[in-house]
């Protein structure tokens, strides 16, 4: 049973390790496609932080952010293979915002502006709520 547990961890972590390797290979001079995808998200986050705190947010080099995320993906995947819960926490913290964004853009039929209606939508999708009158 221990072998299958280790095999499952290796197969699961292979996704993250190979993703880090691909990002590393595509990095290039400008940070690669990962930097182009992350740049608008980082800009919005920095504008939000500066508006909430009332001070100008510092300039952040997008290449360093991508390099850090790539290193943490690889390191978290390796730690996860060896059974460390810290590796799992690293991977969850790196991928949770992206998975939530993916959910909103591709599988959310109402749109992100109606996020407050999520419990109602979930109830109607599972059959616990019927919006049609009898």
Image (cartoon, rainbow, N blue to C red):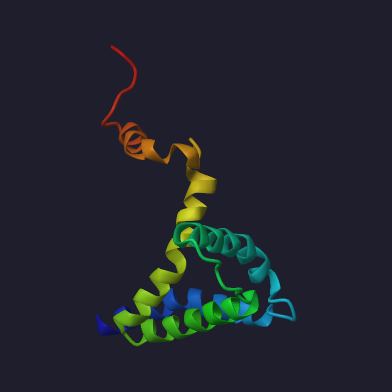
Q: Residue furthest right?
A: 29
Front-lying residue, 131 or 2: 131
* Residue 63 at x, y percent in the picture: 64, 78
- Going 42% across and 73% down the picture, which residue do you hit? 91
Q: Is residue 50 above or below residue 63?
A: above
Residue 66 appears in the picture as rendered: yes
Please state which of residues 39 and 117 is positioned toward the viewer in this rendering: 39
**Which residue is depicted at the point 35% across and 88% down?**
82
The quadrant of the image that shows the C terminus is: top left
Front position in the image: 90 or 61: 61
Rendered view: 67 above or below 53: below
Quadrant location of the N terminus in the rendered image = bottom left
- Compared across the picture, whether 107 is left or right of 61 comes to left
* Residue projecting furthest to the top: 134
Image spot of residue 69 (x, y percent): 53, 77
Please provide percent x and percent y for residue 84.
Answer: 31, 84
Q: At x 35% / y 76%, what residue is drawn?
A: 88
> Residue drawn at (48%, 35%), measured in percent from left and top?
110
Q: Can you tell which quarter of the image residue 27 is in?
A: bottom right
Name the quadrant containing residue 24.
bottom right
Q: Where is 20 relative to 92, above or below? A: below
Residue 18 visible, this angle: no
Q: Is residue 8 above or below residue 128?
A: below
Q: Nearer the viewer, residue 97 or 11?
A: 97
Q: Count the numbered circles shown.
A: 0
Residue 62 in the image: state x and y as whole percent: 63, 74
């Amino acid at each position: 049973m221990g072998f299958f547990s280790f095999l499952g961890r290796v197969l699961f972590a292979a996704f993250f390790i190979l993703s880090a390797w691909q990002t590393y290979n595509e990095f290039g001079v400008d940070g690669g496609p990962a930097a182009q995808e992350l740049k608008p998200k980082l800009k919005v986050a920095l504008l939000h932080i500066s508006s909430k705190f009332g001070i100008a947010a510092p300039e952040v080099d997008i290449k360093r952010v991508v390099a850090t995320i790539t290193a943490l993906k690889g390191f978290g995947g390796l730690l996860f293979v060896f059974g460390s819960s810290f590796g799992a926490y690293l991977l969850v913290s790196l991928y949770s915002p992206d998975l939530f964004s993916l959910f909103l853009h591709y599988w959310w039929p109402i749109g992100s502006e109606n996020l407050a209606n999520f419990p109602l939508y979930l109830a109607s999708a599972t059959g616990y709520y019927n919006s049609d009158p009898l």
